[in-house]
Amino acid sequence: MKIGIVGGGFMGLVLAHEISKTDATVKVFESDSQLGGLATHYDYGSFIWDKYYHVILPTDDHLVGLIKDLGLETELEWRRSMTGYYVNKKFYPFSSSKDFLFFKPLNIIDKMKLAFTIFYGSKINDRKKLEKITVKDWLIKLGGKRTYQKFWSPLLIAKLGDSHERVSAVFIWTYIKRLFQARSSAAQKEHMGYVKGGYKTVFDQLQKALKEKNSTIHLNTGVDKINSGQNGGIEITYNGKTEHFDKVIFTAPLNVLEKVSDPKLVTVSKNKQSVEYLGVLCMALVTNKPLTPYYVLNLADEEVPFTGVIGMSSLVDIEQTGGKYITYFPKYVTANHKYWSKNDQELESIFLEGVSNLYTDFDEKDVVSTHMHKAFKVQPLQVLNYSEIIPKTQTNHPDFFVVNTSQFVNDTLNNNSVVNHVKEFMVDFKKELLQANK
Ligand SMILES: Cc1cc2nc3c(=O)[nH]c(=O)nc-3n(C[C@H](O)[C@H](O)[C@H](O)COP(=O)(O)OP(=O)(O)OC[C@H]3O[C@@H](n4cnc5c(N)ncnc54)[C@H](O)[C@@H]3O)c2cc1C
């Protein structure tokens, strides 16, 4: 059985890995010159690390399971990590029960309300009601205005930028469930993980495992067309060539699906209200000195041009990054944001000025290099009643499948969910493969 997979991001590769454990052989098509999609790596000069920041949480059971399955357990490092807040021009740690007690922007009543919101949120199992209320209204209803302004709003801005008040309460509910469970219950302290060498190590190992199973990966090979085969199966056209597959699985974004697949193969239901995507502009700053003790700094300050600070080197040992420190400055924006019309140099100077204003001891002489990364469509905005406007993808051919992150309804975009999504897909797909082999 010959299976074609469109997209060599994390979804495509994990899928290829699972399928290659059966008797089937897999061919992966990736339009870019390297694997990984949003989780790909980047050459920072003296070291290679993730293009965008990635972290593994202790609750990422599916992802950790995959890492072990790939034989990379010894490469997985867990470290104590810290979260910080920047409120009223001051930095506050927010990583332990002690930090919580001494967090000055909130008074004792606010803190009780905050603790209640987190406890209450973590116990909710049905998202339906939460879809009908904005995150702001829900958080203010449970925890009051000041808790929202001083605690939740910076956290939401770090994740969603200016659009943070348009999402439903589902967003923060999934976040509470994923992140707050990451604190080890014994110590009530955060722990986060990474794989030595970054996600490149994971992709290299996936690639190696595929090779051992005679499966292949084709880089610089964008799929131009997907059609049904004349006598069953599916045909893929790439580089002017057409190849037949018994089954094809599409993992790239929906706009690509609509462009390349024969409309008879798949119906993407459209609603009056279309899904709006957030993109990210992210400056990676390599420095000779550390900038921040926090893995995440949540900030709500309109004068700061980015929406958060990710101190990767507060987590990752610096020998992993050539003895240098790497800090990411993301800004999440919608498609019409003015920053998209600026070139990298203009953006870098805006962001660097923001860094100087935020960290008064920052000296540009310590900068080794700056890198502006941009991704136009990263995640859908989970607005009110999102599950009703999300396009439903219905494939009309028994040998064509769509498995991508646009199908996440109850989830934020993360790789633990990607692995889980693949696992759920494989339950029926394995049965189909068995049936087809009979
Ligand atoms: C700033 C940022 C921070 C993040 N932080 C974390 C984190 O801390 N932890 C975490 O778990 N996750 C994190 N994520 C999410 C993680 O990166 C995604 O879950 C993951 O990359 C999604 O993989 P995917 O394969 O579904 O999609 P993509 O990565 O988008 O892969 C799709 C692939 O399809 C390819 N493609 C497109 N068109 C074609 C075509 N016509 N033919 C062939 N190939 C095509 C693309 O080039 C791409 O490689 C983060 C993401 C971002 C952007």
Image (cartoon, grey):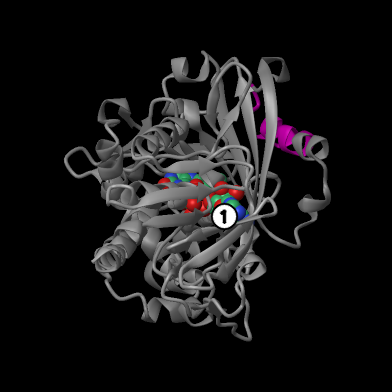
In the displayed structure, does residue 398 sit left or right of residue 45? left
In the displayed structure, does residue 123 sit left or right of residue 411? left
Q: Nearer the viewer, residue 319 or 420?
A: 420
For mark 1, what is the residue? 157
Answer whether residue 277 is magenta in the image. Answer: no
What is the crowding at mark 1: few (fewer than 14 residues within 10 Å), some, or many (at least 20)? many
Height in image: 173 above or below 363? below
Which quadrant does the N terminus fall into?
A: bottom left
Amino acid carrying mark 1 in the image: Ile
Residue found at x 55% / y 19%? 47
Height in image: 362 above or below 39? above
- Residue range in magenta is 349-361
Q: Position of residue 54 (x, y in %)?
A: 46, 40
Residue found at x 35% / y 36%? 209
Q: Nearer the viewer, residue 421 or 162?
A: 421
Q: Nearer the viewer, residue 172 or 239?
A: 239
Residue found at x 64% / y 51%? 222
Q: Is residue 381 visible?
A: yes
Residue found at x 37% / y 81%? 129
Q: Position of residue 8 (x, y in %)?
A: 51, 47
Ligand 1 neighbours mark 1 (CB distance < 8 Å): no
Height in image: 251 above or below 367? below
Q: Is residue 116 visible?
A: no
Residue furthest bottom as drawn: 272
The image shows a total of numbered marks equal to 1
**Image quadrant of residue 347?**
top right
